[in-house]
Image: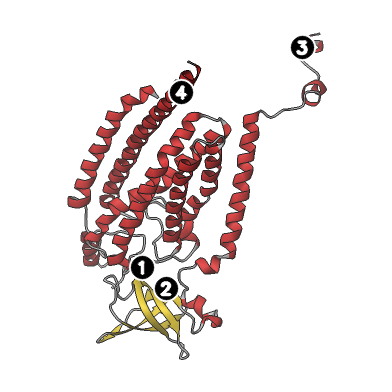
Amino acid sequence: MAWSRFFIWPLAAISALFFALGVWFAFFNSPADYQMGDTVRIMYVHVPNAWLSQMVYGLMAVSAVGSLVWRHPMADVSMKAAAPQGAAFTAMALFTGALWGRPTWGTFWEWDGRMTSTLILFLIYLGLIALWRALEHQANGPRLIAIVTLVGAVNIPIIKFSVDWWNTLHQPASVFRADGPTMPGSILMPLFLMMFAFTFLFALLQTLRMRTEIERRRVRSLERRHVAEGATA
Amino acid sequence: MKWLNRQEYPLMTETSLNTPKRLTRKQKRLLVIAGLAVVVGLAAALILTALRDQIVFFYSPTELMARPELAGEAVRIGGLVEQGTFERNGETNQFSITDGNSTIAVTFIGLLPDLFREGQGVIAEGSLTDAGDFSASNVLAKHDETYIPREVEAALREQGVWQGGE
């Protein structure tokens, strides 16, 4: 992963550029909604975080397969590095959703299908972080965590389709739907800018966290070798 | 005869039957994971199907009418506020919720959300009274999946082609 250092600054620059453009459009150069007024601008933060909360889990599930099938150490590193970020994006989605829900629906929180399944996703992330802390250094720890990660992936389609399967307070999908988006370009364009911005931010943070985790493992094995040499000398 | 060269053209029995196919370790693990995915997916599907009635956040008026056992129980009903039915009397609000098929009259004392209006999707929490109307303790506004800029709405209204509510 030494080559990954060439990605850090470009990723940071691209993310910053998209954030600058996206925030400018979202706040100053996009229309107010005919019903919600300026409250609609919360969407430009809410939707990217909600999208990443699921995308990060997708990456963790793919890494889990890589860990179980190919036993690739980098897959373990990727799983471990992604979990706290997924938890953060999910928390942001829940928080901004509550802020948006109060003026729009008249409530911060209701136990509808979309919100409940997203809260479960947040709890799964917390559980996986705890598992990494508890099991990482045990013999089959990463394998076990990979299995739990894969079992938890069943929640992702539930989140996505909750608004189609059941009556929910949350509205159905506006962007990723079979018959095309239900928003005009003036709202869709800032939304995509912000989604790119957050996605590149995640790519940057994931690269940094994976590099840190690799360094940590290197230090640990050096320490172990040092102790072993000390014992023989 | 080149066809007799067994090295180049082995007999069918020698290739497919005499050399049993062995899965590599990786293929085995992939199979196990595929099996796990099928089992977990099936379990989730069964659970969600069994719990369908509990996961539903609200009933439509038609669904509520079809379930007389829910009379007096705390439930939520959702639908559109019927045009021309909204009346406010001090803090008391009266309106009808319709799904196009059945309509339920709702009484609610309290503050309505900003998005509440005739033609808007709403959800009322409360219970069906003996008289057959709905006494609500809370009203939530639903937002649908369409986003429309204010200027576009104004322009559409001007041209008389506005399809939205009110």
User: Is A106 rendered above or below residue B44?
Assistant: below
- Identified by mark 2, the residue type is Gly
The residue wearing badge 2 is B78
Q: Indicate which disc, 2 or 1, sits on the residue closer to the N terminus.
A: 2
Judge by depth and name the residue closer to the eye, A134 or B32. Answer: A134
Within 10 Å of the Cα at label 3, are there few (<14), some (14-19), or many (20+) other Cα atoms? few
The residue wearing badge 1 is B142
Q: Which residue is drawn at 36% across and 34% down?
A: A209
Spatial distance from mark 1 to mark 3, Cα to Cα? Answer: 73 Å
Q: Which residue is drawn at 81% across and 19% down?
A: B11
- Identified by mark 1, the residue type is Lys
- Identified by mark 3, the residue type is Gln
Residue A44: % across, % down: 28, 51
Judge by depth and name the residue closer to the eye, A9 or B108. Answer: A9
Spatial distance from mark 2 to mark 1, Cα to Cα? Answer: 9 Å
Q: Indicate which disc, 1 or 3, sits on the residue closer to the N terminus.
A: 3
Tell me the number on the disc at residue B68.
none
Indicate the secondary structure of the residue bearing disc 2: strand
Within 10 Å of the Cα at label 2, are there few (<14), some (14-19), or many (20+) other Cα atoms? many
The answer to whether dots 2 and 4 both sit on one chain is: no
The residue wearing badge 4 is A227
Q: Which residue is drawn at 45% across and 40% down?
A: A59
- Check the residue under mark 1 and report the chain it is in: B
Q: Indicate which disc, 3 or 2, sits on the residue closer to the N terminus.
A: 3
The residue wearing badge 3 is B7
